[in-house]
Image (cartoon, helix red, strand yellow):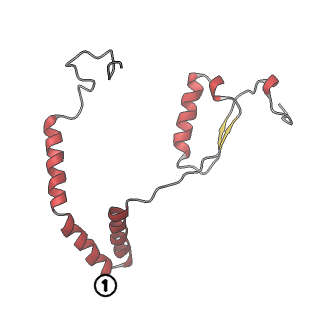
Amino acid sequence: MGKMGNPHWLPGVSGNPGGRSRELAQQQSAARLEAASHSIEGIAYLVKVMRNEAEATQYRLKAATELLNRGLGTPQMQVDIDVIVSRKINEMSLDELRQLEERLAGSLTSTVPLLIEGQLDPIKQPEGSDG
């Protein structure tokens, strides 16, 4: 079995020299531990807000949502994207593929169908196509 990792990296040289410092990692770890030590109190407060009929509905709903998200996890999101491609992906140039990637990423917030414009090979056109 071959060596793991990138064969172009030298031993002892970081692949991410500007990455997170040890000090920052220790601070983040300490902050997580501190937050975790108050989690039971935080959950109790959210339950109190959720059950308090004197609170505005928006705050009660927010508290209930936060409790559900922590207990069950955030709901999965399903995204339907309509893509109309008039060329095969393996026939696109690198620039066209980059544009496709950008448009697909942007389509997650758009309801407009994505249209990739280009020329079809006249020999390989589907039957019933106008060209």
Residue name at image x 75 percent, y 27 percent: 120
Pointer 1 local density, CA inside 10 Å: few below 14, some 14–19, many at least 20: few
- Number of callouts in the render? 1
Q: Nearer the viewer, residue 102 or 67?
A: 67
Left or right: 43, with 106 as reference point? left
| Quarter in which the C terminus is drawn | top right
Residue at screen point 23% across, 73% down? 45
Residue 1 shown left or right of residue 109 in the figure: left
Instruction: Judge whether 91 appears above or below 73 on screen.
Output: above
> Label 1 amino acid?
Ala
**Quarter location, residue 96:** top right
Give the residue furthest to the front: 1
Q: Nearer the viewer, residue 123 or 105?
A: 123
Left/right placement of residue 91 relative to residue 57 reads right
Q: Tag 1, which secondary structure?
A: loop
Which residue shows up at 79% across the image and 26% down it? 124
Instruction: Say which of 57 and 28 sits in front.
Output: 28
Q: Residue at x 15, y 35 (%)?
A: 22
Q: Which x, y percent locates residue 25?
A: 18, 40
Please state the horizontal and vertical placement of residue 12, each as a whole percent of the image: 19, 19
The image quadrant of residue 88 is: top right
Q: Quadrant of the N terminus?
A: top left
- Residue that lies at the very extreme toward the bottom in this rendered image: 54
- Residue that mark 1 sits on: 54
Residue 102 on image: x %, y %? 53, 36
Whether 76 is drawn above or below 4: the answer is below
